[in-house]
Image (cartoon, rainbow, N blue to C red):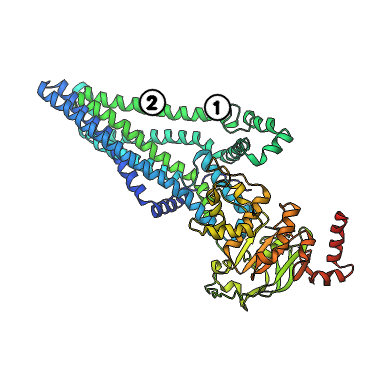
């Protein structure tokens, strides 16, 4: 997996960030409005407070009129109180918008995953790319989500700068009376330029140092993100029911626990990150603070000297020093934002690479006819296939028809291409060569969802959901409990009421309901078959449907296979050849080719053929 390195250029950073803001604006425009209002309120509060304090100090140093003082103090309390309340209220609104943005953030990736062609979902590189995005986000908030924070810091620093400029501008044109302490030279406009230059220069220096310190987060994001992922994975092992037995039998608890003490734990005391925090990273951040101190000293010096020379009174000193501090923080934050945009740029690039993965499967627009007689005939015509990004064909020149209502068994050794054949049949992939036809028309011309609606499939690694039993079978909240019950019984789960005390409303697994039932592998398989039956599609595909069943349940299923499939076209993949005897036709796959096709009797008559050899090998176990 290639790792993210380095910063992007300034122009690139702006472009990437702009795209992120546009994306956020598209899904939650309220976020920008609330953040902008909050920033304005947050920046206004100290400015107003500084300005009012300055008036109070002026009055104290000047007229000292008690009524005036009372009025100013009351105004200050009232105005700052109202502003603080306003800021709080807007803060809550902003928090609400940020929380909903967080949900929508997950939704962006969820939608992408759901809309991707299956070929991408089957590709490890796509998962790695997504895993990296999650790693960086969890580790230090790098990537798309950080752009919200950057917008807030950007807005707040601009508002702070505006407030600072408004409150300090008068300092430059307040004149030192002629001859006072020989400081009339301070009236020269060059001083204004010099002071402004110092504020900008030292702010730049401070933000540069802060940036160098923060760079360690991005520089080690790859390692730390991975470390974090490992730590989270190992932590989840302690509560992983499926792995609990293996962990104990192979004494892995110690190993899992030691990850927390190891040097690789990203947050551990001896991790590289901790060492950098104590070393150069801490030093850079201290330098940044040092710059602030130097600037504060320079500003205080200038402001106080000019006041001493008689340019303004004590109130203004309070106003200018407070406002200059704000101005300085605004400028250094703004510079910091641009620096962070640059380091976040490569993480955004990685996010867009994932979000921009194009779907390449042709999507037709034909709708499949709705036929009550289920007369849907599929044909493989000289189909060859290799997985995307691989050179080797895993299926070669497969020709096959699925007559309506027929029973076909697909057998062959591991890796012979049986599951791939089913994936092509369900159009999870398109053939590399040749074509698959539905009632004589290339399946690519049909709408995806329409075509897939024709298939009920139970894959080997099927998944049930942590939902009530009825919803698992019917794949939705609204369902017919009578039909769900019937499907369960057809699938061989006659005594299901014994296992599910609350009937169809019993939850599966304990993830979302304490009283959820932990079903066995065999029971789960029967529920999965019931789900396929409930879908009531014209094609029924069972990939190793009985692998987790005991021999009695398996025999039962096969005896009733004819009943279960009804008038559907059925395709079974099975390793147990005895179960295929019931099928009209058996296709034998070997090394990606269909080497034989016929009934059990026909294939057994082909002495030395693949089927007869496989049969002989299996029969040996039972003799
Ligand atoms: P079977 O179901 O007969 O055991 P499969 O159809 O699962 O065989 O696999 C056929 C071949 O295709 C195997 O060599 C397997 O390694 C390869 N294969 C399966 N899935 C993928 C994939 N997603 N990418 C690349 N090769 C794959």
Q: Is residue 175 visible?
A: no
Residue plotted at (46% across, 41% down): 340
**Which marked residue is nearer to the observer: mark 2 or mark 1?**
1
Q: Look at the numbered disc 2 and say if its residue's Cβ is closer than 8 Å to ligand 1.
A: no
Left or right of 442: which side holds 66? left
Above or below residue 552? Residue 102 is above
Picture residue at 64% right of the left edge, 48% below the top: 1
Dot 1 alpha-carbon crowd within 10 angstroms: few under 14, some 14 to 19, many 20 or more: few
User: Quick one: label 2 or label 1, which is nearer the N terminus?
Assistant: 1
Indicate the position of residue 210 as horizontal and vertical percent values: 46, 34
Residue 179 position (above or below residue 346): above
Judging depth in this view, the residue of 449 and 124 nearest the camera is: 449
Q: Residue 509: x percent and y percent?
A: 58, 45
Q: Position of residue 588 (x, y in %)?
A: 78, 67
Q: Is residue 499 visible?
A: yes
Image location (x, y in percent) of residue 446: 56, 72
Q: Which of the numbered marks, if any, corresponds to residue 293?
A: 2
Quarter of image, res 77:
top left
Q: Quadrant of residue 391?
A: bottom right
The kind of secondary structure element at disc 1 is: loop
Residue closer to the observer: 152 or 537: 537
Tell me, for residue 601, which label it has, or none: none
Q: Quadrant of the C terminus?
A: bottom right
| Contact (Cβ within 8 Å) of mark 2 with mark 1 | no
Q: Foreground: 44 or 479?
A: 479
Mark 1 C-beta closer than 8 Å to ligand 1: no
Task: Read off the residue under disc 1.
Answer: 279
Please identify the residue farthest to the bottom as the structure is shown: 440
287, 473: nearer the viewer = 473
The quarter of the rendering in which ligand 1 is drawn is bottom right
């Amino acid at each position: 997996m290639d790792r993210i390195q380095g910063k992007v250029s300034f122009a690139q950073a702006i472009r990437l960030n702009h795209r992120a803001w546009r994306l956020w604006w598209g899904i939650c425009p309220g976020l920008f409005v609330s953040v902008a209002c909050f920033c304005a309120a947050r920046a206004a509060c100290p400015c107003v407070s500084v300005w009012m304090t300055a008036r109070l100090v002026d009055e104290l140093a000047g007229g000292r009129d008690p009524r005036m003082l009372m009025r100013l103090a009351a105004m200050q309390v009232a105005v700052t109180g109202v502003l603080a309340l306003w800021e709080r209220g807007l803060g809550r609104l902003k928090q609400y918008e940020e929380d909903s943005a967080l949900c929508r953030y997950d939704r962006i990736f969820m939608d992408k995953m759901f809309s991707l062609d299956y070929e991408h979902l089957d590709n490890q590189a796509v998962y790695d790319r997504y895993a990296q995005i999650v790693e960086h986000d969890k580790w230090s908030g790098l990537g798309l989500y950080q752009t919200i924070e950057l917008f807030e810091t950007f807005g707040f620093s601009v508002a702070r700068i505006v407030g600072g400029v408004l409150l300090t501008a008068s300092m430059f044109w307040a004149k030192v009376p002629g001859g006072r302490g020989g400081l009339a030279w301070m009236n020269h406009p060059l001083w204004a330029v010099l002071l402004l230059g110092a504020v900008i220069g030292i702010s730049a220096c401070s933000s540069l140092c802060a940036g160098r310190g923060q760079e360690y987060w991005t520089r080690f994001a790859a390692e730390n993100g991975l470390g974090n992922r490992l730590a989270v994975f190992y932590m989840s092992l302690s509560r992983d029911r499926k792995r609990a037995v293996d962990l104990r039998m192979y004494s892995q608890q110690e190993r899992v626990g030691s990850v927390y003490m190891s040097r690789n734990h990203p947050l551990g005391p001896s991790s590289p990150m901790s060492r950098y925090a104590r070393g150069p990273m801490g030093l850079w951040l201290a330098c940044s603070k040092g710059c602030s101190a130097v600037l504060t000293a320079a500003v205080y010096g200038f402001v106080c000297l000019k006041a001493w020379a008689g340019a303004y009174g004590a109130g203004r000193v309070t106003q200018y020093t407070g406002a200059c501090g704000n101005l300085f923080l605004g400028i250094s934050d703004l510079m910091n934002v641009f620096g962070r945009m640059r380091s976040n740029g490569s993480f955004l690039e990685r996010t867009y690479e994932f979000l921009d993965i194009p779907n390449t499967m042709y999507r037709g627009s034909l709708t499949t006819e709705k036929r009550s007689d289920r007369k849907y005939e599929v044909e493989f015509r000289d189909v060859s296939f290799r997985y995307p990004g691989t050179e080797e064909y895993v299926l070669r020149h497969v020709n096959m028809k699925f007559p309506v209502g027929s029973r076909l068994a697909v057998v062959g050794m591991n890796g012979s291409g049986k599951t791939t054949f089913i994936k092509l049949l369900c159009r999870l992939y398109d053939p590399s060569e040749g074509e698959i036809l539905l009632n004589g028309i290339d399946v690519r011309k049909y709408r995806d969802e329409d075509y897939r609606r024709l298939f009920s499939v139970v894959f080997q690694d099927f998944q049930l959901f942590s939902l009530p039993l009825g919803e698992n079978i019917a794949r939705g909240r609204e369902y017919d409990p009578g039909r769900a019950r019937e499907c369960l019984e057809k699938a061989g789960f006659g005594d299901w009421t014994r296992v599910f005390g609350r009937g169809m409303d019993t939850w599966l697994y304990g993830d979302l309901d304490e009283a959820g039932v932990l079903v066995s592998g065999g029971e789960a398989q029967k529920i999965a078959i019931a789900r396929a039956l409930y879908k009531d599609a014209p094609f029924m595909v069972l990939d190793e449907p009985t692998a987790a069943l005991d021999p009695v349940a398996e025999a039962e299923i096969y005896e009733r296979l004819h009943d279960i499939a009804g008038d559907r076209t059925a395709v079974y993949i099975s390793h147990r050849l005895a179960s295929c005897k019931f099928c009209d036709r058996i296709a034998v796959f070997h090394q990606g080719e269909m080497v034989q096709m016929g009934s059990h009797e026909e294939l057994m008559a082909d002495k030395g053929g693949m089927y007869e050899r496989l049969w002989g090998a299996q029969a040996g176990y039972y003799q």
